[in-house]
Amino acid sequence: MKGYDYDGVITNNILPSPGDVIITGRSCTEGVERTYLDMKRRGIQNIAVYFMPHNWKGLPKLAGLIRTGQWKAHMIDILELEEFFEDEPTQYKSILEHLKGNTKITKVG
């Protein structure tokens, strides 16, 4: 199973296959409806989406990007993904630093 960031990966038409997942830094309290509408428009169906919990949000700028990468690494480990696609440089680095498993992290863009 592979995982994909949403903004910058899915939005650039790097699309998941059935059984894959999306792990997004978008909050589970904001942007959920917008995300699902955009997925429908792109023809993405039956893909699990993991939104960042609200209690992980709130840090400004760089610290927020690092924290988002930390949360994504946590989810990647829980889901035991074989590969994850990320475009944002700070989050990419944070994922690599916090990842405990052997998932291949692919930098997009």
Image (cartoon, rainbow, N blue to C red):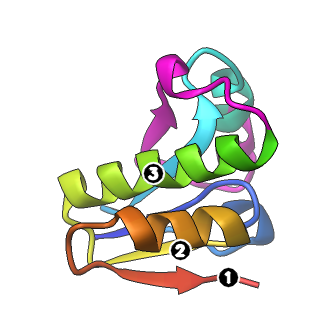
Quick check: 56 left or right of 79?
right
Amino acid residing under circle 2: Phe
Residues at discs 1 and 2 in contact (Cβ within 8 Å): yes
> Where is residue 86 drawn, in percent x and y?
59, 70
| Mark earlier in primary sequence (1, 2) | 2
Residue 68 position (above or below residue 34) = below
Q: Residue at x 67, y 41 (%)?
A: 64
> Where is residue 24 drawn, in percent x and y?
57, 46
* Magenta-highlighted residues: 37-60
Q: Which mark is residue 46?
A: none
Residue 64 position (above or below residue 42) = above
Amino acid residing under circle 1: Val
Q: Secondary structure at mark 2?
A: strand
Please name the residue that numbered disc 2 is placed on. Answer: 85
Task: Single out the mark in the foreground, 2 or 3.
Answer: 3
Q: Which mark is residue 108?
A: 1
